[in-house]
Amino acid sequence: MSVKTTTVAPVMAVTGFWREHRLGKLLHVVVVYGLLIGLSFLFVFPFFWMILSALKPEFQIYKWPPQWIPDPIQWSNFSDVFGNPYLPFDTFIKNTMILEVGMISGRLISCTLVAYGFARLEAPGKNILFGILLATLMIPNAVLRIPSFILFNEFGWINTFKPLIVPAWFGEAYAIFLMRQFFRTIPKELEESAVVDGANRLQIIVRIIVPLSIPVLTVIGILSFKDIWNDFMGPLLYLNESSKYTVSVGLAYLNGQYNTQMNLLMAASVVLMLPTLILFFFAQRAFVEGITMTGLKG
């Protein structure tokens, strides 16, 4: 009798542990997937609401209880926005692309040179300067608006693209930080071999550092594209003529002082959101790789 008890007890203990362990794993999966589904719905819901609102007549947007399916589907909202002669979105897009090219190219070139210096060159006080650079991230942009406007007004740059493009050629703190972290992951032996072959610093940067840094350059490019595309205060502050406005300022014209045609505003927002989504879709792999690799070495 005693032998039977001692044989069954360990078996029951193992079975109970296995059941408890499997139940724990099941609870873990349920909680994790529940959180993921809930958060996904939370973040995706405004996006779907925007698309549905872009296809509704105006009175259906404010209807309560909400009417989810547009009836009828009003495709003319898009033509009403982009066919409006008082809102030349083709000009707004052209102006925005001029800023995109000028600012992104300046930011990539200047930040690459500065980040290479912080990552590879030896100089007294280099770490102190890098700390001061990071400290500038803490300065609110609102504090710099008035001094910058006074300075550019003295230069005679108001109502031109210069106040927006020229500062981009003097670096950006977060971009320099990301690039420096990435450059430090590149083996120094590659540069030493290039020096033995007679390459100078500029040739090393152009032929070795830049080709190996495509992921982090892609990250900086995508983030910069998004920031410039969505920037509202900069163009509004420095540009006075509607022929020089950007898409973000053009969208604000749909938000009237007394009445806002929400369906037209949502239709314009859906179309003007597409360039950023398409860019991220095609560069997603390099973007994720760049974000991952910039944190490998401090």
Image: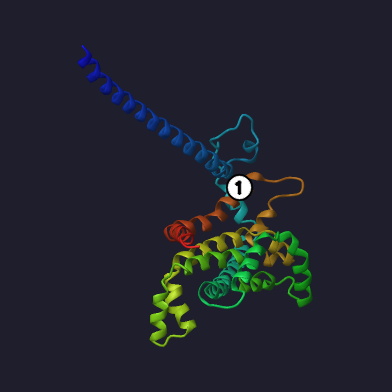
- Count of numbered labels shown in the rendering: 1
For the residue carrying disc 1, how many other residues have a C-alpha within 10 Å: few (<14), some (14-19), or many (20+)?
Answer: many
Q: Is residue 3 left or right of residue 297?
A: left
224 vs 145, left or right, is left
What secondary structure is marked by label 1? helix
- Residue 152 image point, x, y percent: 75, 73
* Closer to the camera in the image, 30 or 106: 30
Name the residue at the front extreme.
2
Quadrant in which the N terminus is drawn: top left
Q: Nearer the viewer, residue 179 or 239?
A: 179
Q: Quadrant of residue 237?
A: bottom right
Out of 75 and 19, give the one closest to the viewer.
Answer: 19
Q: Which residue is mark 1?
A: 266
Classify 29 as above or below 81: above
Which scheme is used to colour this image of the protein? Answer: rainbow
Callout 1 amino acid:
Met
Residue in the image at 50% along x and 41% along y: 40
Q: Position of residue 65 (x, y in %)?
A: 61, 29
Residue 223: image x %, image y %?
A: 55, 60
**Which residue is at a point 58% across and 70% down the rendered structure image?**
107
